[in-house]
Image (tube, rainbow, N blue to C red):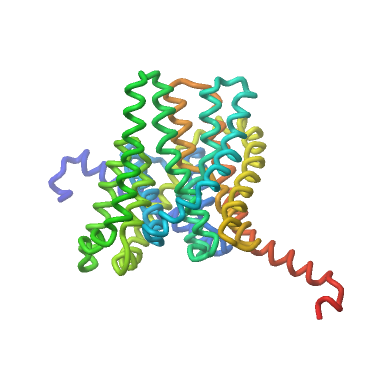
Amino acid sequence: MLAGLVPSAAAEIAVLFFELGVVIVALALLSRLANRFGFSPVPLYLLGGLIIGALDFVPISLVTEEFIEAGAEIGVILLLFMIGLEYTGAELSEGLRTGLPSGLVDFVFNFIPGAVLGLLLGWSWLEAALLGGVTYISSSGIIAKLLTDFNWLGNRETPAVLIVLVMEDLAMALYLPIVAVLLRGDGIMSGAASLLAAVATVIIVLLLAVRFGDTMSRFIGGNNETILLSVFGLLLLVAGVAQQLQVSAAVGAFLLGIAVSGNVAERTHTLLSPLRDLFAATFFLFFGLQTDVAALPAALPLAVGLAVVTALTKIGTGWYAAGRIGTATLGRLRAGMVLTPRGEFSIVIAGLGAAAGTASGLVPLTAAYVLVMAVLGSVMVRLVEPVWKTVQKRRLQHRPAEVRV
């Protein structure tokens, strides 16, 4: 096939293959390094992309960058879809009925710090609301990867974590259209139409997942090849429709995962896990590549201060949400730690502001903040159990001998 291509096209494909090979080998080395020290590779993927983009020692052509960007988008979708496979529609409905208080606490605790900082910096109320959205929304992609890497999917606190994430994604389905309308200065009727379309899409997909999940699972059943093609194709279709209607593709992917149940869900998990790992790594690397390193130093001190405050507020959110379902102390700490990273949604929000010409400091502050939170959250997740065990051991050692007996 390559022989029939014109020389320039053949050379372009050769460059694409070579550059992708270098990128994937680099990801493999980072994964091996992370496994060597027993922690999640997510921070290394992010930092790897940042270093490659800053030093430019691995030249990336426009074609390769576009290919990696598409792979990164697929990675987020696959991560959320695989999480959705772990739970049924009935479990999601019950969680949403009982999870509203956790969602409200999450919003109040984590939106306010960013919004207040924006006002203190002299930004308009709309620009402050953008920064509030940046600090409010956790990274579903990073959290999903962490839950998988640390085998926490079966933990008692994980349903509380997932409900917080779903509430956030549903909130983004309302927040993003409203912000986009306000930034564009659209009329009331146009803004109301966008908002109604977003709400209707989420509700319809959720109802289909709950009521017709078994029917969908029977429809896509078959041999491994049939299941792989059916599920992956349907996943991309749902994500594309959701994104076109200004609803998060992640929401559509998660709800589709809920709809797939039974034996088909188990086989789908096995078939798609390798694809998830590949594309998820691509997503985190691409995020690092897209960060403007030159703008980070000036924004870093402010980002670190904001990260400290909002790390504590997210830990408080997880503590409260997990406590509502009767989780013990360690589980409540795990829930708080794993909710800490920010990522893809925060970048989307900052991008909306940049496109509309809002506060010039929003984009570098968001980039520095997300990088700090992604690394900080991943490290805290890695350390929470060892630190907890050490503290408990010291407590036991310092108890009186007659109490220990």
Task: Quadrant for residue 198, please give it.
Answer: top left
Vertical arrangement, residue 111 with respect to residue 44, above or below: above
What residue do we see at 35% from left, 27% from top?
A: 192
Residue 195 in the figure: left or right of residue 132: left
Left or right, 332 with respect to 262, comes to: right
The x and y percentages for residue 14 are 27, 47
* Whether residue 87 can be seen here: yes
The residue nearer to you, when weighing 7 against 130, is 130
Q: In the picture shown, does residue 146 fall above or below 390?
A: above
Picture coordinates of residue 93 (x, y %)?
41, 54
Q: Residue at x 51, y 59 (%)?
A: 158
Q: Nearer the viewer, residue 82 or 142?
A: 82
Percent x, y of residue 354: 46, 25
In the rendered image, residue 340, in percent from the top left (x then y), is placed at 57, 48
The residue sitting at 46% across, 20% down in the picture is 357
Going by the picture, which residue comes out furthest to the bottom? 405
* Among the 4 quarters of the image, the one containing residue 364: top right
Q: Residue at x 65, y 24 (%)?
A: 120
Quarter of the picture containing the C terminus is bottom right
